[in-house]
Image: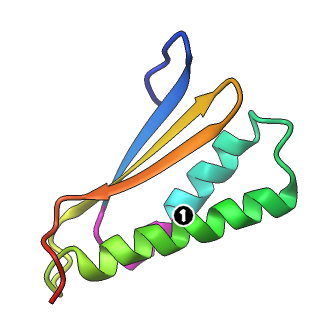
Amino acid sequence: MGAMSEEGRSVRLTIPARAEYITLCRLALTGIARVRQDLSEELLADLKLALTEATSNSVRHAYAEDGDGVVEISYELLEDKLVIEVTDEGGLAT
């Protein structure tokens, strides 16, 4: 499911730039967060909201209206934190 390093574990998810795949990103976050026993339900809900907003922004604005592109979500589980990065290679929205 991802590459493991000595410092932590990471998972990279690449999805089509389409809104229907955002739920998959949230499900992956839920599964990854279960490894971290110290994350409260409230914090997980906040992380899901932030992930949804970032991914939605990429889906909505990075590519032409046809949604022809991909969005990459990187989850990195370190000893003391969970890092989530959302990237795309789309152009600037006008």
Classify residue 5 as left or right of residue 49: left
Crowd band around label 1 with a 10 angstrom C-alpha radius: few (<14), some (14–19), many (20+): many
Which residue is disc 1 drawn over?
51
Colour theme:
rainbow
- Tell me, yes or no, whether the highlighted magenta stretch contains residue 22: yes
Magenta run includes residue 34: no
Judged by its main secondary structure, the magenta piece is: helix
Question: Which of these two is toward me, 73 or 19?
Answer: 73
Q: Residue at x 22, y 74 (%)?
A: 62
The image shows residue 3 at horizontal and vertical percentages of: 43, 22
Q: Residue at x 60, y 32 (%)?
A: 77
The residue drawn where x is 69% and y is 23% is: 79
The magenta-colored residue range is 16-23
Residue type at mark 1: give it.
Answer: Leu
Residue 38, horizontal then vertical, whole percent: 86, 39
Mark 1 secondary-structure assignment:
helix
User: In which quadrant is the C terminus drawn?
Assistant: bottom left
Q: Is residue 48 above or below residue 38?
A: below
Q: Residue at x 45, y 29 (%)?
A: 2
Instruction: Give coordinates of residue 48: x percent, y percent.
Output: 64, 64
Q: Is residue 44 above or below residue 74?
A: below
